[in-house]
Image: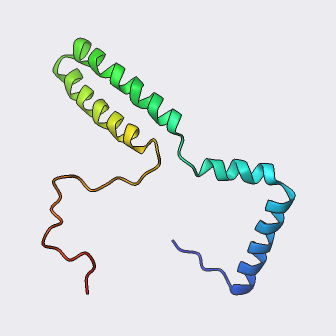
């Protein structure tokens, strides 16, 4: 669902945002921080999942092994996400032969 604002409403909204940024910079810093990735949290979660994977294999049998594979895969995803970079295309994706920008 896309909400389209009237130009007058957009101007009022932008004015309110500007006023809020000027009057309460501490609040704006907290809001801006929420949109940034948390590298320490992602790295810690990935480490915990990697530690948990062998335990699942030992105590879970074949179900634990399957669970360990899922945990390890998700841990790699979290570890790659820690810097906030968008995921790169996989190495097996063929890009040769396709034009870079369609004409």
* Residue 61 as seen in the image, left or right of residue 11: left
Please state the horizontal and vertical placement of residue 89, each as a whole percent of the image: 27, 56
Residue placed farthest to the top in the image? 59
Q: Nearer the viewer, residue 65 or 75?
A: 75
Above or below: residue 64 compared with residue 42: above
Q: Nearer the viewer, residue 7 or 18?
A: 18
Q: Nearer the viewer, residue 16 or 44?
A: 44
Residue visible at 45% across and 32% down in the picture? 43
Residue visible at 64% across and 48% down in the picture? 33
How many marks overall? 0
Query: Which image quadrant for residue 74?
Result: top left
Please state the horizontal and vertical placement of residue 8, each as a whole percent of the image: 75, 85
Above or below: residue 99 compared with residue 36: below
Above or below: residue 48 compared with residue 36: above
Q: Nearer the viewer, residue 6 or 88?
A: 88
Please state the horizontal and vertical placement of residue 6, each as a whole percent of the image: 68, 84
Residue visible at 80% across and 53% down in the picture? 25
Please state the horizontal and vertical placement of residue 103, each as a whole percent of the image: 26, 87
Residue placed farthest to the left in the image? 97
- Which colour assignment does the render follow? rainbow
Above or below: residue 23 compared with residue 84: below
* Residue 97 as seen in the image, left or right of residue 29: left
Residue visible at 79% across and 61% down in the picture? 21
């Amino acid at each position: 669902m896309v909400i389209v604002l009237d130009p007058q409403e957009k101007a009022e909204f932008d004015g309110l945002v500007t006023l809020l940024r000027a009057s309460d910079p501490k609040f704006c810093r907290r809001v801006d921080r929420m949109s940034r990735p948390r590298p320490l949290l992602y790295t810690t979660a990935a480490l915990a999942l990697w530690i948990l994977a062998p335990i699942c294999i030992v105590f879970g049998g074949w179900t634990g092994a399957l669970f360990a594979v899922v945990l390890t895969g998700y841990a790699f995803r979290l570890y790659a996400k820690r810097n906030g970079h968008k995921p790169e295309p996989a190495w097996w994706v063929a890009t040769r032969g396709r034009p870079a920008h369609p004409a």
